Image (cartoon, rainbow, N blue to C red):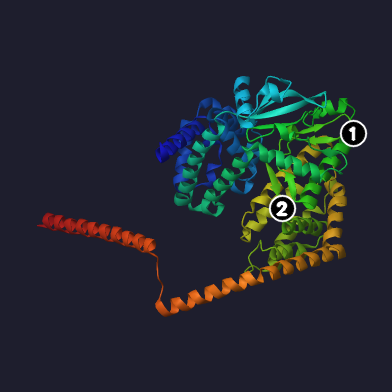
Amino acid sequence: MGTSGAYFRLARAGWIMVREGVIAALPGDQLWGLPKLGWRIGRLFSRRRSSRLDRSERFSKAVARLGPSYVKLGQFLATRPDVVGTEIANDLAKLQDSMPTFPREQAVAAIEGSLGRTVDDLYVHLGEPVAAASIAQVHPAEVAKDGVLRKVAVKVIRPGVRRRFFQDLESYFVAARQMERFVPMTRRLRPVQVTEILEQTTKIEMDLRLEAAALSEIGENTAADPGFRVPAVDWERTGRDVLTLEWIDGVKMSDTEGLRLAGHDLNALAATLIQSFLRHTLRDGFFHADMHPGNLFVEADGTIVAVDFGITGRLGKKERRFLAEILYGFIVRDYRRVADVHFEAGYVPRKHDPASFAQAIRAIGEPIHGQPAETISMAKLLTLLFEVTELFDMEARPELVMLQKTMVVVEGVARTLDPAFNMWKTAEPVVGGWIRDNLGPKGLLIDARDGVNALVALARQAPELADRAERLTREIDLMAEHGLRFDDETAKKIGKAEARGTRWGRVALWVGALALVWIAWQVT
């Protein structure tokens, strides 16, 4: 079906969003031209009953009709407020990734096809599904290890989800290209590049071996952390389409009343959650990017266990330093330092004046210092910061936007547990410790060591670099002596393109000539 199929699926998706009132719920007053016309038409054709629903409910009804691919698209765009705006991102974050379960027989076929062994050989017992999302569903099971039965969770990929997603992805690319072509104001948001990122992240999420690897890495990183852990992976029973891991018995963090009845200290849980997230971000540079309360369990001893690592984020050393210095700069009201960090990291072009940028940063920071610490939101601060930096041509950086969005969710969970939660006091031991270790004398020694290692690596490559430079010099000399030369295949392609251009040029001339004859005939 190809591209025509993509246009058909895109038209169907558009019609469903129109009928469910999604288009009508968008802030169309800010549009103009063709987008404004499309918004007005969308309002005319939306169902009357949809007007009684808020925007998040309209999104939910639309994606329920469109299927798993659009649930995943909505979840992805919820992490990109720079693309869809903060309000719509918040609405999309409310999408429930809950889908109908598929038959156990299909799950058995997927497990056996992925692992090359029978289910009876792998598990003592495999139960019926207990939860299903857009990409996979979970079964309880039991395995025998060293003569002991252990309960495990078995996550199995939904049949046909890859084929369906990549069909819909073709439609997403069509829509992105049309936006860049016909809606100039969207070009700054790079819709095609955003779609490419969606493609890559979903490919990773649909290979459960990679989720297992993320669990394993974070498990190693957090092995000595107080009050936080992740489930252990059963690698023998894990493949591309199936992930087997330790079963977690605990209370979901979304069940605040259940946590209270179980005797947990909600204030302590809020502090542990925030400090754990900041450790993963600053210390490890690798964090769970989908830490909503449904993915967090609390065990009987108060340990927080995170599950569902399909979406993760990484920060390089530069980004971690950037984040820590910014937070510290706001704490001590050193706005010029916050501005300088942006320029040093290369996030803001050098054409802008650092003093003017520091002035804009001050407009964010000063209102904070007149408030009680427990009312100050670190996530809101980062959101405002990214809005201001946009005025100074700071391009959206996916890793920082994902971090900011995850921080919004994590901080929201903490404040649900403890409405008087003091984010800054709780974060200081982690942020301050990281700054002391990485920006003080110890950090200078680490940077010096890294610099020496880089010089040693460069020295080892010196012979190869010299050889490349010599070859390049010879080729430039030959080019200067004999001119630019192409191989036979390149010459053929250029010839064909030239012939095609000449042919169409002749057609255009004939059309022009015939038009002139017709005009002359009309005049006479």
Label 1 sits on residue: 265
Q: Residue at x 68, y 19 (%)?
A: 128
Question: In the rendered structure, which amino acid carries the disc numbered 2?
Answer: Leu
Residue 43 in view (yes/no): no
Residue 354 visible from this viewpoint? yes
Please name whichever residue, 255 or 372, is drawn nearer the observer in this view of the structure: 255
Label located before the other in sequence (2 or 1): 1
* Residue picked out by circle 2: 315
For the residues labelled 2 and 1, the Cα–Cα distance comes to 31 Å
Task: Please tell me whether mark 1 sits on a helix, a strand or a loop.
Answer: loop
User: Looking at the picture, which amino acid does disc 1 mark?
Assistant: Asp
Examine the rendered structure and indicate whether residue 249 appears above or below residue 406: above
Quadrant for the N terminus in the image: top left
Pick the front one: 83 or 217:
217
The residue under the point 43% across, 38% down is: 7
Residue 231 in percent (x, y) is at 78, 35
> In screen coordinates, is 127 left or right of 164?
right
Tell me the quarter of the picture where residue 153 sits: top right
Q: Is residue 161 left or right of residue 432?
A: left
